[in-house]
Every structure is written in structure tokens, then in C-alpha cells.
């Protein structure tokens, strides 16, 4: 699994990607911004989402209960990793509603 991230063809992308600080980059964005995060996200914390929002206060911040990094609703923490590779876990309905409302504005 790690080979998909650390194989030689991926290295230039990984090096260039790590050079950017999202909280600095978002400051210059002039378009409407929707910052989404879930309370069950084990890769990006709620505080990271809040930092992005604070860096561009014109953004809209939405924290979705029980949504994880792959945008699925999970109830139990032990189901988090399983949801990454299984279609048994539904996409967050609140996520769909929030995105649709944001786009219509």
C-alpha cells in the first residue's frame, strides 16, 4: 500500500505538494470557498478545517457529524478504515445537501 505513495513516479508530485501551506494558499482565493470536514476524519482534523476558514474568513465552514475522510457516514470508530474500501457505508447525505446548497448560491 505504501508503494503507491512512495514509488519513484510519485515522488515529484509528493515533493511539490508538500511545499504548499493550505492556510497560506487559501488567503489569495477570491472565489467562493466551502471548507468541509467530518468529525470522524482521521486524516484532516476539525482544527485544520477551522484554520483554513480563519485564513479566509469569507469562506463557509461546515463540520459534518460522523463523516470521515472519504466522505462516508460512520457511527463507530472501528468502522472508519473499513469504510475506505467498502461500498457498505453510505456517502454523507448532509454532505450532498451542503454542496448542492452552496453551488446554488
Image: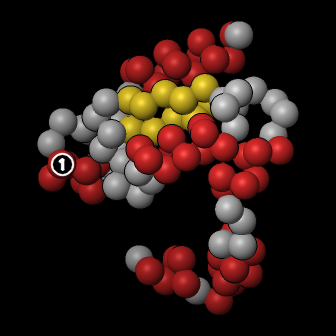
Left or right side of 31 for 43: left
- Give the quadrant of residue 72: top left
Q: Quadrant of the N terminus?
A: bottom left
- The residue sitting at the bottom extreme is 8
- Give the quadrant of residue 9: bottom right
Q: Is residue 72 visible?
A: no
Q: Is residue 8 above or below residue 59?
A: below
Q: Residue at x 49, y 50 (%)?
A: 48
Left or right side of 32 for 87: left
Q: Which residue is mark 1?
A: 77
Q: How many marks?
A: 1
Q: Nearer the viewer, residue 79 or 77?
A: 77
Left or right side of 96 for 16: right
Q: Residue at x 54, y 29 (%)?
A: 61
Which x, y percent locates residue 36? Answer: 52, 35
Q: Is residue 82 visible?
A: yes
Q: Residue at x 30, y 44 (%)?
A: 40
Amino acid at each position: 500500500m505504501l508503494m503507491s505513495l512512495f514509488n519513484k513516479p510519485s515522488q515529484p508530485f509528493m515533493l511539490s505538494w508538500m511545499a504548499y501551506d493550505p492556510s497560506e494558499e487559501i488567503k489569495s482565493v477570491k472565489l467562493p470557498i466551502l471548507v468541509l470536514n467530518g468529525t470522524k476524519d482521521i486524516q484532516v482534523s476539525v482544527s485544520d478545517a477551522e484554520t483554513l476558514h480563519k485564513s479566509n474568513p469569507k469562506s463557509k465552514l461546515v463540520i459534518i457529524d460522523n463523516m470521515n475522510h472519504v466522505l462516508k457516514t460512520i457511527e463507530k470508530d472501528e468502522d472508519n478504515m473499513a469504510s475506505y474500501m467498502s461500498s457498505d457505508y453510505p456517502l454523507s447525505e448532509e454532505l450532498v445537501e451542503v454542496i448542492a446548497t452552496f453551488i446554488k448560491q
